[in-house]
Amino acid sequence: MSVPSTPLTRVCFLLQVRPDRLEAYRERHRAVWPDMLAALHDTGWHNYSLFLRPDGLLVGYFETPSLEAAREGMARREVNSRWQADMAPYFEALDGLAPDEGFLQLEEVFHLD
């Protein structure tokens, strides 16, 4: 995997997985569709990780040259529309937004290289 040459922005976000769907959510992420993985990579989502607390709090982290461009790139991908529709029932409090639009982005206050 090549490392992008442009500076990357670190993005951390929160979502809430429904407590009754935790194991199903884990299972879905053991087999992310190959075309979804390719779309994420191709649109600038790098070093992407998800962390799940037992109560369903999901913490996501990724690096990207541009969050706006990464989101716009995924919005143009058909596979993303299918994935977001498939994943939406796993989450609480999205207020009609897709999970990739409804996450709460956290402010970075410290980073140690």
Image (tube, helix red, strand yellow):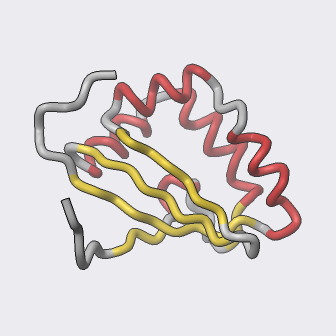
Horizontal and vertical percent position of residue 29: 68, 41
In-image side of 112 versus 27 (left or right): left
Residue extending farthest to the front is 113
Horizontal and vertical percent position of residue 110: 23, 75
Q: Quadrant of the N terminus?
A: top left
Is 32 placed above or below 48 here? above
Horizontal and vertical percent position of residue 80: 54, 35
Q: Quadrant of the C terminus?
A: bottom left
Give 34 or 77, whichever is nearer the viewer: 34
Horizontal and vertical percent position of residue 71: 37, 45
In-image side of 90 versus 40 (left or right): right
Instruction: Say which quarter of the image contains residue 48.
Output: top left
Residue extending farthest to the right is 20
> Residue at position x 70%, y 63% from top?
91
Is 74 placed above or below 111 here? above
> Residue at position x 63%, y 38% from top?
83
Residue extending farthest to the bottom is 109
Residue extending farthest to the left is 6
Looking at the rendered structure, the number of numbered marks drawn on it comes to 0
In-image side of 40 versus 89 (left or right): left
Is 52 placed above or below 68 here? below
